Amino acid sequence: MQVEIREQEPRKAVCMSHHGPYYKIGSTCMALGGWLKENSVTGTGPFVCLYYDNPQTTPEDQLRSDAGIIVANGFNTDDPRVHISQVPGGLYAVALHIGPYDKIPAAWAELMATWLPASGYQAAEGLGVELYISDAADVGPEQAQTELCVPVARASRA
């Protein structure tokens, strides 16, 4: 797994809320795509998923996440089906996953359980973020690129 440490700038996203298992967020992404077309929203950045809870400690039916798309800072909407979220900036470990979306949970597990403990970094307070760099519908599932981003800090020495 290739991982780089990167300082990310904060970004703005228009989002739809998803509650429940993280692996089922795809339906919310599809609903957001429909909303974007319906509202002729253009000039957007990549799709993004924001994960608010730790799936290791939060029951699946209580997990909270957002499916969104990066928008310009001046973007606003009063449509109650969506909301504006801030994608926090800061120091992140960023792993590039190339392949089908259904393999992303295994990539997250490798990042968190294998790479992170050996890295000299530790998970920091904040959101887990997925950035969809290329869409499987455009490039095929095997070539889809997704960045998995976890906020980190230098590990403290014992």
Image: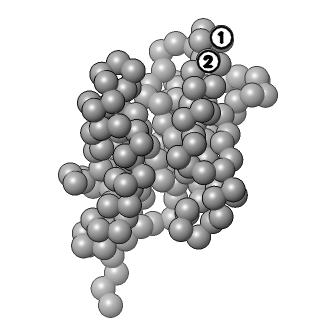
Give SS at disc 2.
helix
Residue 38 circle label? 1
Q: Where is residue 38 shown, x and y percent of the image?
A: 65, 11
- Residue at the left extreme, as displayed: 2
**Quadrant location of residue 111?**
bottom left
Which is nearer the eye, 7 or 106? 106
* In this view, 24 is above or below 105: above
Question: Which amino acid does the dot numbered 2 rest on?
Answer: Gly
- Residue 81 is tagged as none
Instruction: Tell me the residue at 38%/25% (across/down).
Output: 135
Label drawn at residue 34: 2
Please count the marks in the image. Answer: 2
The residue under the point 40% across, 39% down is 101
Q: Quadrant of the N terminus?
A: bottom left
Residue kind at label 1, given as amino acid type: Glu
Tell me whether the residue at label 1 lies in contact with that at label 2, contact meaning CB atoms closer than 8 angstroms. yes
Nearest to the observer: residue 158 or residue 2: 2
Dot 1 crowding, Cα within 10 Å, few <14, some 14–19, many 20+: few
Residue 94, horizontal then vertical, whole percent: 32, 50
109 or 82, which lies in front? Answer: 109
**Residue 75 sits in which quadrant?**
top right
Per the model, the C-alpha gap separating discs 1 and 2 is: 6 Å
Q: Residue at x 34, y 81 (%)?
A: 156
Left or right? Give the position of 97 relative to 51.
left
Relative to 155, does residue 38 appear above or below in the rendering? above
For the point 52% across and 59% down, the residue is 126
Quadrant, the C terminus: bottom left
**Viewed as shown, does residue 152 lie left or right of 81?**
left
Q: Is residue 91 visible?
A: no
